[in-house]
Image (cartoon, rainbow, N blue to C red):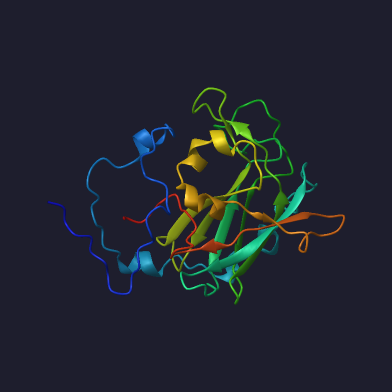
Amino acid sequence: MTTPHRVVPGYRPDPPNTHPPLHFPAYRATTLRHPTQPLALLPQLLTEVTGPLLGPGRVAPTDSDLTAQHAGEPVGQRIIVFGRLLDGDGRPVPDSLIEIWQANAGGRYRHANDRWPAPLDPNFTGVGRTLTDARGRYEFTTVKPGAYPWRNHDNAWRPAHIHFSVFGRAFTQRLVTQMYFPDDPLFAQDPIFGSVPESARPRLISRFSLERTSPEWALAFEFDIVLRGRNATPFEEPHDD
């Protein structure tokens, strides 16, 4: 006999077929990463819900422009990534910290464990952050990341993507997802993208925006992040169903 799922008053679970499962055999790393024992509830204490503070004084003007963080410009196609952070009712979520990290135009991360023979770019670190404004809007300037091999299966390559981390009022309130680019030929053979239920996959793909493209400067891609509800963005740490 199964125990009925408890729903806290005012909390609406996301519909089924929204988030990827914790264990997805085709994505080999989940075999070791997913929990095999019942989770233990650890109540949040005062220090966990009140600090550290996430405020505008902690975000520098160049944090959202990944092409202006070094002495020179990075190699690659310059792009603008913009969108809105919304709750389950479509209302904007203001003053929320959004962080991104990504590979460079050659598909390599600036990380000690990334050693495949693609060049490192001395003018590109690949990390940025910003706060949403009063209307829930955010914007980054960066370069389009390249695909890269990752040894999950034979001839495995990850599609071009940007990692997003969304914070609430404290570091314990964090959601992580990925943004992909339209019409990528690697979608079909990527088990991370494939672990997301088919009906929810389009929510992870950005939309090209000619309107927001900056003439002779940068292409633009729109990516809205919805925290809950029937249009929720799939996250890497799904809620219990």
Residue positioned 44% across, 49% down in the render: 236
Image quarter of residue 103:
top right
Asked whether residue 59 appears in the rendered view, the answer is no
Q: Quadrant of the C terminus?
A: bottom left
- Horizontal and vertical percent position of residue 162: 60, 48
Q: In the picture provided, is 68 more to the left or to the right than 27?
A: right
Looking at the image, how many numbered discs can be counted on the residues?
0
Residue at image point 43% right, 54% down? 18
Residue at image position (49%, 62%) is: 231
Residue 71 shows up from this direction: yes
As drawn, 99 above or below 11: above
Q: Vertical placement of 77 versus 140: above or below?
A: above
In this view, the residue in front, 98 or 209, is: 209
Residue found at the far left of this picture? 1
Horizontal and vertical percent position of residue 143: 72, 47
> Quick check: 35 above or below 49?
above
Q: Is residue 98 left or right of residue 3?
A: right
| 217 lies left or right of 38 | right
* Residue placed furthest toward the bottom: 134
Residue sitting farthest toward the front: 199
In depth, the one of 160 and 112 nearer the eye is 160
Examine the image and state in which quarter residue 15 appears. Answer: bottom left
Measuring from the top left, give residue 163's x and y in whole percent.
56, 49
Q: Is the residue 105 above or below the residue 223 in the image?
A: above
Given residues 119 and 149, the one toward you in this image is 149
Residue 74 relative to residue 234: left or right: right
- Residue plotted at (48% across, 70% down): 87
Q: Residue furthest top?
A: 154
How far across and down, in percent of the image, does residue 2 sit?
16, 52
